[in-house]
Amino acid sequence: MKSIRICSVAAILIGVVGCATPPVVVAPVGPNPANVASAASMGSLQVFSQMMVQNDDQNQGGYGKYDWQQHTDYNIYDLHGKLIMHVFNETGHYAEAPKRIALPVGNYLVKAQAKDFFWAKVPVTIERGRTTRVHLDDNWKPATVTLKQDLVTMPNGNPVGWPAESTKKSGIN
């Protein structure tokens, strides 16, 4: 009984510390500058947030649970902090790919869980006919010819995405 109480207190403390930890904020992310835009009037966003193990408690007839991983949900805000959308970041029940959503052209703020960090705030630029991808799961490996200074990175050096065009032109990164 005492060990259950200790585990409960430890879980509560971890939860409180996790909620109190400020999110990491990175430079603005935009679409890959090498990709050509389509004729679509809107742009799209795909967020590779932290992966979380899922299971549906099936297949317990001696085989154990069937587990898979999916990207965690995230929120999109306007630049004034108003919630625009909560994104359920899955494309199917067992699918591991994150959802790609259509958004009007503009600048937004994504708040999502990131591997090795509790939360990350990522300013994103959505351009007409192009997809902006944010990589917070540490699984993105840009082409080896890409220089690290040409990417937006987390404080630990892991790449997050391509800098927004306005950021590259202004020299901010």
Image: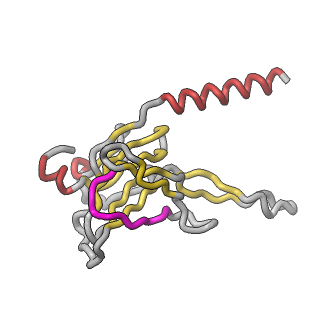
Q: Is residue 159 visible?
A: no
Task: Give percent across and percent down for residue 126.
Answer: 29, 61
* Of residues 171 and 122, the one drawn nearer to the viewer in this rendering: 122
Looking at the picture, tell me which residue is in the foreground, 78 or 139. 78
The spot of residue 76 in percent (x, y) is 41, 52
Give 78 or 142, whichever is nearer the viewer: 78
Look at the image and tell me in which quarter the N terminus lies. Answer: top right
Magenta segment range? 98-108
Tag count: 0
Q: Residue at x 32, y 54 (%)?
A: 161
Q: Does the rendering let one see residue 4?
A: yes
In the visual, does 60 lie left or right of 54? right
Residue 167 located left or right of residue 10:
left
Tell me: residue 129, above or below residue 31: below
Specify the quadrant that holds the C terminus. Answer: top left
Q: How is the image coloured?
A: secondary structure
Asked whether 129 falls inside the magenta stretch, the response is no
**Predominant SS of the magenta segment:** strand
Image quadrant assignment for residue 100: bottom left
Instruction: Say which residue appears at 35% left-offset and 37% top-offset.
Output: 155
In reply to whether residue 105 is colored magenta, the answer given is: yes
Q: Residue furthest left?
A: 170
